[in-house]
Amino acid sequence: MNDGLAEAGERRVGWAARSMPVLQAIAAGFAEDRPLDGLRIAACLHVTAETAVLMGALKAGGAEISLAASNPLSTQDDVAAVLSEYGMAVHARAGVDRDTYYRHIHQTLDIAPQIVLDDGCDLVNILHTERTELLGDVAGGCEETTTGIIRLRQMAAEGALTFPMVAVNDTRTKRMFDNRYGTGQSTLDGIMRATNILLAGRTVVVAGFGFCGRGVAERAKGLGARVVVTEIDPVKALDASLQGYDVQPMSRAAEIGDVFVTVTGDRDVVRAEHLAVMKDGAILANAGHFDVEIDVRALEDMAQSVNFGVRPNTDEYVLDDGRRLLLLAEGRLVNLTAAEGHPAAVMDMSFSAQALAVSWLAREAARLSPGVYDVPPDIDVQVARLKLAAAGIVIDELTPEQEEYLHSWRVGS
Amino acid sequence: MNDGLAEAGERRVGWAARSMPVLQAIAAGFAEDRPLDGLRIAACLHVTAETAVLMGALKAGGAEISLAASNPLSTQDDVAAVLSEYGMAVHARAGVDRDTYYRHIHQTLDIAPQIVLDDGCDLVNILHTERTELLGDVAGGCEETTTGIIRLRQMAAEGALTFPMVAVNDTRTKRMFDNRYGTGQSTLDGIMRATNILLAGRTVVVAGFGFCGRGVAERAKGLGARVVVTEIDPVKALDASLQGYDVQPMSRAAEIGDVFVTVTGDRDVVRAEHLAVMKDGAILANAGHFDVEIDVRALEDMAQSVNFGVRPNTDEYVLDDGRRLLLLAEGRLVNLTAAEGHPAAVMDMSFSAQALAVSWLAREAARLSPGVYDVPPDIDVQVARLKLAAAGIVIDELTPEQEEYLHSWRVGS
Amino acid sequence: MNDGLAEAGERRVGWAARSMPVLQAIAAGFAEDRPLDGLRIAACLHVTAETAVLMGALKAGGAEISLAASNPLSTQDDVAAVLSEYGMAVHARAGVDRDTYYRHIHQTLDIAPQIVLDDGCDLVNILHTERTELLGDVAGGCEETTTGIIRLRQMAAEGALTFPMVAVNDTRTKRMFDNRYGTGQSTLDGIMRATNILLAGRTVVVAGFGFCGRGVAERAKGLGARVVVTEIDPVKALDASLQGYDVQPMSRAAEIGDVFVTVTGDRDVVRAEHLAVMKDGAILANAGHFDVEIDVRALEDMAQSVNFGVRPNTDEYVLDDGRRLLLLAEGRLVNLTAAEGHPAAVMDMSFSAQALAVSWLAREAARLSPGVYDVPPDIDVQVARLKLAAAGIVIDELTPEQEEYLHSWRVGS
Amino acid sequence: MNDGLAEAGERRVGWAARSMPVLQAIAAGFAEDRPLDGLRIAACLHVTAETAVLMGALKAGGAEISLAASNPLSTQDDVAAVLSEYGMAVHARAGVDRDTYYRHIHQTLDIAPQIVLDDGCDLVNILHTERTELLGDVAGGCEETTTGIIRLRQMAAEGALTFPMVAVNDTRTKRMFDNRYGTGQSTLDGIMRATNILLAGRTVVVAGFGFCGRGVAERAKGLGARVVVTEIDPVKALDASLQGYDVQPMSRAAEIGDVFVTVTGDRDVVRAEHLAVMKDGAILANAGHFDVEIDVRALEDMAQSVNFGVRPNTDEYVLDDGRRLLLLAEGRLVNLTAAEGHPAAVMDMSFSAQALAVSWLAREAARLSPGVYDVPPDIDVQVARLKLAAAGIVIDELTPEQEEYLHSWRVGS
């Protein structure tokens, strides 16, 4: 390992830690109580500075850790270097190919984990299909993403899941803050770094109006863009419309958009029929977990030629009719690839919930049957309370009379 | 009944009906299918034009209806007149005293209802305490408000509730649209009609950041105000802060606010200690269901004199130290009292859900044990779908490949 | 004059005065210095509570006042009553016909004014065409509106204007605050009072993107509407687009709008060709000074029948093809007719500038040749400074070093 | 010159050119008409891709060009390389020291310019103080920045300016678009690239509420921040307050801010007394032209140690009391240093105005006396019209009746 690399990593992790006061407070508590003493943890997460702070907290709690990357493009090599130096087994390198990616997950599993942390369900999937010999040791785990949760619920429904998994993604904290504010800002940040276009006055099409899509729409609007939303859920579509967004089917949005951001959790949201009608110069970015939301293969098929790297993380596809479509980050997560992913301040909340969930699993897993579990709600409240305190924000407490009023149904109008 | 009054009511109801295309579509279906044929319904709701459209839909479905007002101040007498003319038993008059208010509820219950519709739980409460002889006939009911649901859940927890109640308030449609957009706009509308103050540049304190509070905060901000939010829930407080609002405890907010809006569902949110430090000219308004959120008694105790009606729905309390505090609508619902309540377009959604929920209860109540039930989610989706259609908004449908992808967990990254 | 009316007027004026601290501070100074002692002033202004506070300030300065209404629909009769009681000659009554309107202006001019205050240039126009015998006495005057200024500049260009007129409308304070924030809020307020529609999710077309149009667009957006802007000036159109608004020609906007607001200062902005393609239920409102912006005659010609007063200030025009178009306030100023005009807080600024401009004219008019004059810029700054002080807002002062830096060009990079 | 460098420069300039359709249209016209045939132009501008497109347009018009950098930190070396290759004399390199910076300006002047283009007035200043022998040749010039205009007006007032200068900065297009939208977005972009902090929920203090400050405030708000504005002009301060911003003196803002952005055009806006009370972790950025707005010397004096480069373009100053203040881009233009300056789309407008102004000067300079001139207004309108056309936006044209109405003052109410 390169010394300069580890040093750069240390600086980067130190910077992130400043914006993660909640996780640092939890780490301090863990260092005292050692709730994870001797526990083997295998994690498949984006190998970033913020993840490093989480790993530090778990290690402070006594855990032995093995880490793989959940995405070949998001690994910060300097962070991997410093984590290795801290004594964790890190199997991650930026830009590896598919085979290496999966080999890294296998190597990570070699620790024979008792707790697993996953981000997209690849590690848990491999455990249940190719490393079934390790299943017996696993007490439980946590999953970070909506996409992963969908897969886990499906596994549970089919009876295939053999241990309890906590849906860290489904905390109020995660959905409200991480998904909305984190994805929102970092996606626009990625688009600006990749293209340096002026967003004011542009038409930005946001496909999907879940928490992430909402965040992307808000930030695009906040930067002066006109926002068009596409949805498949009538309730979300109606909500978007009442928030003042222009709701359109993708077939129509494709004709008017200057920038497209997919954030649906589904595949082929932008596909050949849409590419066929887009304006010259249209920009395509994906902020959903997997690189399936934009049909890149269709784009390749339609292109006469490709100019790779016309800007950093920007490839230009020249179509037969002369139109040029710009694909950012190869259709992978634009906020992680072209920018730096979620700011540490939001990761502070979701990773704090995760640290507390791991500690809860360490205590409770034995009592839980296989399945997908919500994070206990008091963890959420605890994280929010610590975050407010760190920001110097004071809120109200119920008076005894107010407490009583809320619990009484006998009071009339 | 006065003819001119009924005519004015008919015009008013006709106007509302234009903005309620979903409920009218449902009424048309009801008229054909008669799903409520012969059913006796007792309703305790705000007697407004939109309620009249709902009553019309239920009547079209075959129901026999008896109606009381859920708030002494919100009754539109002309609407009451026209409903009487349509053959419903209406027990409501604007501005009645407390005794008459409760007498009206009793008269309404005389129908011996099979289904009850409530808005704040007063009718259901009286049924369970003073009219227990009628409980045997009641198959089930619907409750409109958060406040009412809190009381019902408490009753259910204590084993006191004797029939199934559907929490109409808890639909996504109701919370997202009615609470957020309806309360938001109409509350600011009420404040403007009562005071005609310029909101730009004013500091508006919003107590409570639930869906209603969020809506009020958004509209106040949209009118150019600086918004301060007070909360007791750390997660909501954090969310408010991340949306750019200034989060403060009420003790501090009281010192800096120009306008105060309470929308918490709890009592004494603005109380003596806060009134003591407010600025001269501060305006106090309540948008929560009951008139308990501002401690009006404390205000009366502190006042040296009161100038009633310095503006419509605005009373001026002159304190010992010369400061003047302005109480809107006597601390009752400012959006209903000083303006016209929720615009018909939002009531369209919640009342459509309610109409469909009544129809569902008519079919299913026999199979349900006592307790609080969610509205079946497909009702929500059906309402949203009809609303989008009425607005001419087309949304996407999943392709078979997308449908399959969402149900598969075997696809990797 | 009716006693109760004057009492109601006094209450109304007292309410406005609370939100006009700057004008009250100026009135206090005037009462001491008597800068207008014995001066005869003829004013043609909207006879509202705020105007009454201005009249009070001028009277405090020693002026003798005669007042007519600048718009037949905006007169508040109770305010007229209380002003009469205060000893001013008031010639105004709500809802008078065209002949009476002009007769009132003539009566007002009978005072043989030395200073004139105008709002739309009707009084000055009559002076120069029908009452030329009075021109000799007139030292100068003030004009309130953009429309009036356009007419005055035209008169000046043709050599027809015989005395100096101060373009009160052209102060930064007036354009930025009165036009933008005052017209913005009160126009939407008027639309809500007239129709009680939900604005969230509606498409609001704003014709004209001057300061007034900008204000209307901001408030419509702030209430959750999608805003379409029409313009004829490329620079303003581009600005609107970069602020995220959808810029369209009226021919296209007419097809997609739910609500139309004209605020251009020009005629026939909405005309037959646009009415022909509007959606059923479209709402038409004017916020420009004159009632010429919507071609009401074309609407009448196209209508098969008209239902007057389907809501307060709302008339329904039923067209041959069954579409129903809703005209608010007969196409006159919707914010004055359906709501209460600008909130006192903004009028405080423009009327304070006007009071100081009258005082400046009293001193300087003799030295000025006929023409249109800007308000001296220090009046603007003085008004803003007083307003900030009244709001308790403290701002920075330049340090001597900063002052020097701004005046030096020798400092390099 | 390095071949790879020129190639990278060509790619970068090509990218910018795509977003500059107006300037490209003008260049095409220039290539045909050759309005600058044989003219010697010396320019002192930020050497960026957008400037290169402008230089290309002038060269297409027939000019001979010599170019220096107007800021030592903003030069893109690859752009300099490609311009050299295109046959222009380029005297610019990233990161040069003060002496080299001025030497470059001198070398640029060696062309003996007939037209000068300046950005901050350094070149014009040197011409008038150290290179007076060249003054005789200079027919006129253009100045880009507010700061430069202030210096030029001072020179003109003192009779020191010897030729006409066009205030390109004072076009509506420049102030509205370049200053507001360009500085707004790129400043926030720079802060995000330098720090990757989450802006949602942070308190951002914007010093100065001119067009640039307004843009910064809007974008900060649009990213979820609470914005505090400081000002010295009462009218601008009031405007900020009415737009919903919290207006405070810097002494108070310093205590509550998380991020500070200076954009005033004056020195020492953030100085020792403010640094003394800031929170640990406060971030300091300048978006004003010169690096004098944050008193960096005071910061250095107060610091016990400095950690340079804790993030790219971020230095950490550790104070005696342990507080850490983070200075971005050494107090120089954060949008140019930490991001890429204004997006090409806004530069398109101001540089198009500049190209047309140079062409106008070439025709008219002989008829102009020394002084500061506005850009002729039709240039502004022409630029806006071309930009709308490029964006596919159609706007209305006045009908003959509307045209006539605007020019007639005889029409009454």
Image (spheres, coloured by chain):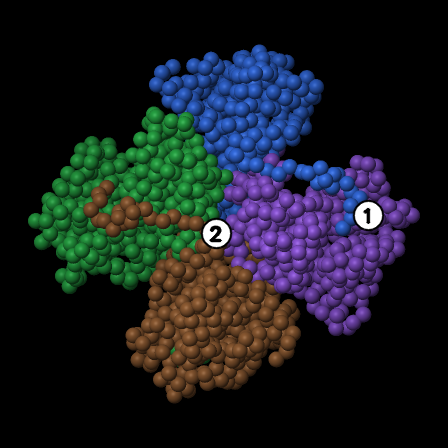
Chain colours: A blue, B purple, C brown, D green
Q: Position of residue B146 (x, y in %)?
A: 71, 45
What residue is rendered at 32% in x and 46% in y? C399
Q: Residues within 10 Å of mark 1 (few under 14, many from 20)?
A: many
Q: Is residue B234 above or below residue C309?
A: above
- Can residue A397 be seen by looking at this rendering? yes
Helix, strand or loop status at disc 1: helix
- Nearer to us in this view, B144 or B204: B204
Residues under labels 2 and 1: Cα distance?
50 Å
Q: Position of residue C49 (x, y in %)?
A: 54, 69
Q: Are marks 2 and 1 on the same chain?
A: no
Q: Which residue is mark 1?
A: B124
Q: Label 2 crowding class (10 Å Cα cut-off): few <14, some 14-19, many 20+?
A: few
Q: Nearer the viewer, residue D89 or C360?
A: C360
- Residue at point 37% right, 22% down? A8
- Asked if residue C272 shows in the view, the reply is no
Check the residue under mark 2 and report the chain it is in. C
Residue placed at 70% from the left, 68% from the top?
B11
